[in-house]
Amino acid sequence: MSVGFRAVQWNRRKIAYDAILLAGVALYIAGFMEISAWRKPPADWPAWINLRIDAFGSCAFIMLTIILSIGPLARLDPRFLPLLYNRRHFGVLTFCVAAVHGWSVVEWFMALDALPNLGKELTNAAAYGKFIGFPYKTLGIAALTVLLLLAATSHDFWLAFLTPPVWKGLHMLLYLAYGVVVMHVALGALQDSRGPLAPLLIGGAFVWVAGLHLIAGRRERRGDRGSAAGEGGWIPVGPPHAIPDKAARIVTAPGGERIAVFRDGAKVGALTNLCAHQNGPLGEGRIIDGCVTCPWHGFQYRLEDGRAPPPFTEMLATYPVRLRDGIVEVDPRPLPPGTPAAIDVIL
Amino acid sequence: MRRAHRTVHRALWPVLAVLVMIGLAAALWLRPPPKVESSASVLMHAQVSPFPSPHSRSEWRGGVRGGGLFSSPHASRANKERPPTRLASLATLPAARSARGGREGAR
């Protein structure tokens, strides 16, 4: 393999993020079980397991809902970006919580000495033709499998090995998994729930997540419209002062990817909008310590040539820029990664 | 995200939203009505059956959380006729007893 493995590089922010996450999960599980047991004391061990099934299942659902909200929320409001920073740890913990939920179901059958019944339920072919009565545990297993796949490939090693486009495509399976989980709950737990609260919470969570993604997608569509090209295919960006200092204006090559045109004082340069790490939106970042900094995970690149400062080795495609009649223009044909292309402009 | 990812994202979410909302609505609309029991039968049931049905599932279906069949060919009928008392008696089986006793012993 051409990609070297490096263990998770911890920093204070990641430790704080994970500590808050673990504390939140522990509090929820303990609170759920405590309150449920107080309201209706479990009669025996299977009833305790049942309580655990509900506690971990609902916790995993809430965590999935939050994870899927972070992406579009960060697109719509940069104040949510800190949540995105360590989202992969959130995902791995969600898988762990969901796995305990799944294992508890198996344990429930084992406690009743009825494990073969679980197998029969999952292999009852006739039930798969029904809607009500569909073996909803299969849906849970399918979603858990997706979560396992995503958790197993969440490390940067797999991100580099699979390449960001493939990795991102793989991790978009989470959208489908969420839909499957909603149906798992709808055909399972909600079938016995008579009050309006549970359906409202489940339905509300899905509407919230779907709504956020639809709004964010609609907004992104506007950004994907190709910018009008001028003479020779060059795209006008605007006068230099129209580009905010130490930030970027984003233009879109017709039918192509977005280009981030940054200004650092009197220097203007154009880089691809895709961070080499996770294809984050580089143009929404800022120039910090002389380097373009990705808003997602802080990967940095030099404006003049798109190279990460030593000892890092990542490189981005750059684009030729020019100043013509007081207007900054960018050529949408990318240069090889790491090619110097920034220019000085007179403000 | 690359343009291709954004395109997939934009195409996927409307379809997913519609399908899941229809599925969710249908699952709620078609769910079986709750069983109406007289207070006497509820009381008797409570006395003979301390078994904790998971989620108080709408009916006893073979000791399986949310469905399933017994191994016996007469299982489904037996399930309806002999509800949770059979489960209560499972507690006396060695496996269940050890599972239960083990946990209680651990407390």
Image (tube, grey):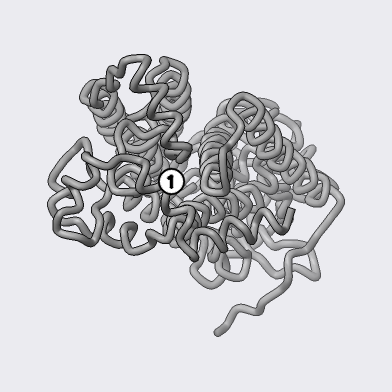
Q: Is residue A9 left or right of residue A28?
A: right
Q: Answer yes or no: is residue B23 visible.
A: yes
x and y, in percent, of residue A178 in the image: 42, 41
Quadrant for the C terminus of chain A, please. top right
Q: Secondary structure at mark 1?
A: helix
The residue under the point 69% across, 33% down is: A34
In the foreground, A332 or B17:
B17
Relative height, residue A194 to residue A54 (above, below) = above
Relative height, residue A200 to residue A131 (above, below) = above
x and y, in percent, of residue B35 in the image: 28, 22
Q: Answer yes or no: is residue A67 visible.
A: no
Subunit under mark 1: B
In the foreground, A123 or A153:
A123
In the foreground, A52 or B27:
A52
x and y, in percent, of residue B84 in the image: 36, 41
Q: Report the number of discs.
A: 1
x and y, in percent, of residue A235 in the image: 47, 39
Q: Residue furthest bottom?
A: A1
Residue labelled with disc 1: B88
